[in-house]
Structure formats: C-alpha cells, structure tokens
Amino acid sequence: MSLTGLTNIELGAEGRGQTITFLTNRNWTVSWSEPWITVTPSSGSASNGTITLNVSATANQGVARSATVTIKAESLSQTVNVKQESGDLLVGTWGLIHYESRHWRNGKIWISEDIDCNPYAPSSLWDKKFVFNHIENNSYAMTIYYWNSDSSKWIADSAERVSIQNNTFVSSVQNSDGTYRAVEIEIRSLTSEQLVLYDFERNIPESGDEFYEKVTFTRMN
C-alpha cells in the first residue's frame, strides 16, 4: 500500500474537503481520531487503480486543532496528519432574516410563529441584530440589538457571555425564582454568510411545556 497524494492535510476553518489518494491490492478500512472529521468512503475492496478519499471537517469556531486519518489494508497501515485552522466565523454582526417557533402546552400547539425579517430595512421589534465578540478560548460576548421604530435606531437590548462546546451555544437563563438553568442551543449551520440556531426544550421549569425554535441569520459584516 502506498499514498500517492497528500500525507499532510490543512483544512480551512469552514472545513471544506480535501482528498487523499492511495494504491492497494488488498481490502482496506479508514479510521480517524476526532469526531469533527468525516472521511468517505470509509472502506473498500482491493483495486488495481487509484483510490480517492474525501476528508472534511465541521466548521471550527475555536482554536486550531489537529487529528489523524489512518488507512489500514490487512497488516499494513499509513497515517495522514490533518490540521484545521482556527476559525472565528462567528465574530461579527448577524442580522435576523427568519424566525420560526412552536410552543406546545398540554400536548397541543399553543403558539406558532413563522416570521420573515429584513435587517437591511428594519421596521419592527422583530428586526434584530446579534453581535459576537471573541473573549477567550471558546467564549464570546453576545449583544442583541432590536429596532426601535420611534427613534429609527438600533437599541442594545441585552448582553451575555456564551461559550461554544461541540457546536452548541451554552449560556445561563434566570428562572422566575432567581435560580439559573443552563440552556444549550445547537448551531445547526455556520458559514461565512449564514448562521442557523436551533433549540428544543422539553419540560420547561414551572410549566412542563415544550418549545421549538429555529432562527436564521445573515452576516452583515
């Protein structure tokens, strides 16, 4: 077995794929050391031709990271080193373009909302901007602005510190009794142009309700 292409791969923060090519006349399998990497295909049969693998990664919102990809063909093996550059795709200003939510009470939909917004031509309180600034490691300061039609200005509504763990926002929300609970919001998609957040909560404290929310943003700067 021999590699015919890259032995070291460097991926951008967005994680777009690169290829590994190799030759082997034996059945083969591929494994990788970190969950943020995906390699396809992951196994195959003996071949007289060049075999091509695609290596991709999830978007990196934190510091630079590294992993290995190992190709095994019976007793033979070769390793490719993979590095992904640090990514602060999140940093900047994001304008809300669509808000979707469902709120269930006693097993029935109580509130349902589907709202399109235009942060470039704001007209109501639904028009919002989220501004993210990097603090340290995977922590960010998040400031939310809403459009005030009376003054025709963006007004800072709230600011909080959030951390990102495994493509999930983790923050604290205060309950009515003064205690706090951790809230996790999935980063469903993050590219240089679009951010999609997804949240689903079961058994909300005090009410036992269920709540689903999907929020889509476009990058403004």
Image (cartoon, rainbow, N blue to C red):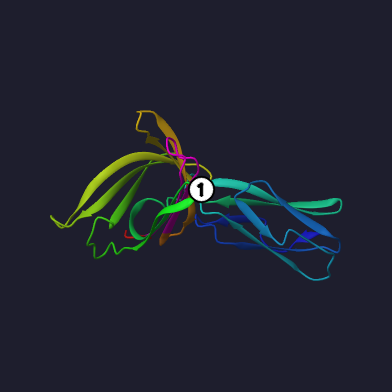
Is residue 138 in view from this perspective?
A: no
Viewer-proximal residue, 6 or 11? 11
Q: Is residue 47 above or below residue 60?
A: below
Q: Residue at x 40, y 31 (%)?
A: 180
Q: Quadrant of the C terminus?
A: bottom left
Percent across and percent down for residue 192 are 42, 60
Would you name the residue on which mark 1 appears?
A: 167
Q: In this rendering, does residue 119 appear at all?
A: yes
Quick one: SS at disc 1? loop
Choose between 42 and 46: the one closer to the eye. Answer: 42
Q: Nearer the viewer, residue 179 or 208?
A: 208
Name the amino acid, label 1: Asn
**Quick one: label 1, few (<14), some, or many (20+) residues within 10 Å?**
some
* Residue 95 falls within the magenta-colored stretch: no
Residue 65 image offset from top left, x and y in percent: 55, 46
Residue 194: percent from left, percent from top: 42, 60
Can you say whether 143 is above or below 116 in the image?
A: above
Quadrant of the rendered image containing residue 38: bottom right
Q: Where 106 falls versus 193 (above or below)?
A: above
Q: Which residues are magenta?
A: 195-217
Dividing the picture into quadrants, the one containing residue 48 is: bottom right
Left or right, 3 with reference to 65: right
Residue sitting at x 51%, y 48%: 167
The image quadrant of residue 49 is bottom right
**Which quadrant would the N terminus be assigned to in this image?**
bottom right
Pick the front one: 203 or 107 = 107
Q: How many tags in the picture?
A: 1
* Residue occupying the far top of the picture: 178
- Depicted 50 relative to depicted 112: above or below: below
Considering the whole magenta stretch, tell me its main secondary structure. strand
